[in-house]
Image (spheres, rainbow, N blue to C red):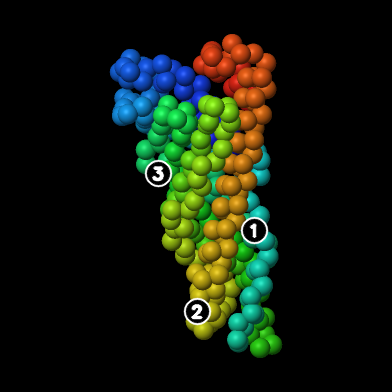
């Protein structure tokens, strides 16, 4: 995921100076990656779906290599009035299955702020998780395995690049839909215990897993922004000429990640 977003962010930055040059004639650019620009009052936008779709297959390899899929889930202990639930050895699967959830937009404004914005609506179609459970009701312990699915977990990531300071940042990162959670159990449990477990999964476990997913996304996004800033500053501080010709140095930036 880190490599994917970084490539998208750097690609957007590399085209920014070209976008600015063409703001008076937005039909001139035809990079083969961007669909036609929409222009208005010093702001131009482009849809970059094709480019993002070409990069998405790289996510699986990156996530597995960096141990993001599967990702460990922490142990959870929850006391109820008549039961105690202990979940252990949890794993979250499916972070590598990231998909585009609508149009990915690049917007550039030369009105006062000179900012480029990359807006990424994304989703995980099929997240799954497993836990070993130990449920204590009075004295007996009920032991088994829980398997769950979270369908269509959607989030929105917006990256910005400030051309006054040559600095990238996260403009917005939020969950837009925490998805639908369901689960099955392997083990002998009564309907009464299943109902307690079901309440626990929907009201407590689902929000906890959402927080873990958000933490993974935020951590990776912050690392990406830091890497982008380090690379851009290293290059730009070396030469004023480079500042004025960012697209020509695009391969140099990308070479650092191959």
Say which element carries label 3.
loop
Residue drawn at point x = 53 percent, y = 26 percent: 163
Task: Report how far apart the C-alphas of labels 1 and 3 lie in the structure.
Answer: 26 Å
Looking at marks 2 and 3 on the same chain, the residue that comes earlier in the sequence is marked by 3
How far across and down, in percent of the image, does residue 201 sit?
53, 69
Q: Position of residue 257 (x, y in %)?
A: 63, 26
Residue on which disc 1 sits: 73
* Residue picked out by circle 3: 101
Q: Residue at x 31, y 17 (%)?
A: 25
- Kind of element beneath mark 1: strand
Q: Is residue 91 visible?
A: yes
Which residue is most to the top?
Answer: 241
**What is the CA distance from the residue labelled 2 to the residue labelled 3?**
34 Å
Q: Please name the residue shown 47% across and 28% down the image.
A: 114
Location of residue 95 in the rendering, given as x and y in whole percent from the top left corner: 55, 47
Residue 97 seen from this side: no
Q: Which residue is mark 2?
A: 195
78 left or right of 99 in image: right
- Choose the circle earlier in sequence order: 2 or 1: 1
Instruction: Single out the residue that lies furthest toward the front.
Output: 112
The answer to which of 103 and 201 lies nearer the viewer is 103
């Amino acid at each position: 995921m880190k490599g994917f977003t970084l490539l998208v962010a750097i690609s957007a930055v590399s085209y920014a100076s070209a976008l600015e040059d063409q703001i008076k004639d937005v039909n001139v650019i035809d990079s083969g990656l961007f669909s036609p620009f929409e222009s208005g009052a010093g702001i131009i936008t482009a849809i970059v779906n094709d480019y993002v779709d070409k990069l998405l297959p790289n996510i699986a390899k990156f996530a597995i290599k960096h141990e993001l899929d599967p990702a460990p889930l922490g142990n959870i202990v929850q006391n109820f009035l008549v039961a105690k639930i202990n979940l252990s050895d949890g794993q979250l699967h499916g972070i590598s299955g990231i998909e585009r959830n609508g149009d990915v937009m690049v917007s550039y404004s030369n009105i006062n702020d000179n900012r480029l914005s990359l807006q990424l609506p994304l989703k995980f179609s099929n997240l799954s998780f497993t836990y070993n459970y130990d449920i204590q009701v009075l004295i007996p312990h009920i032991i088994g395995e829980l398997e769950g699915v979270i369908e269509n977990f959607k989030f929105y990531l917006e990256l910005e690049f400030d051309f006054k300071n040559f600095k990238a940042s996260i403009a917005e990162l939020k969950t837009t839909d925490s998805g639908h959670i369901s689960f099955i159990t392997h083990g002998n449990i009564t309907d009464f215990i299943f109902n307690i477990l079901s309440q626990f999964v929907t009201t407590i476990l689902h929000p906890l897993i959402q927080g873990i997913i958000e933490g993974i996304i935020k951590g990776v996004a912050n690392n990406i922004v830091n890497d982008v800033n380090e690379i851009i500053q290293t290059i730009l501080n070396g030469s004023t000429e480079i500042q004025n010709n960012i697209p020509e140095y695009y391969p140099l930036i990308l070479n650092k990640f191959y």
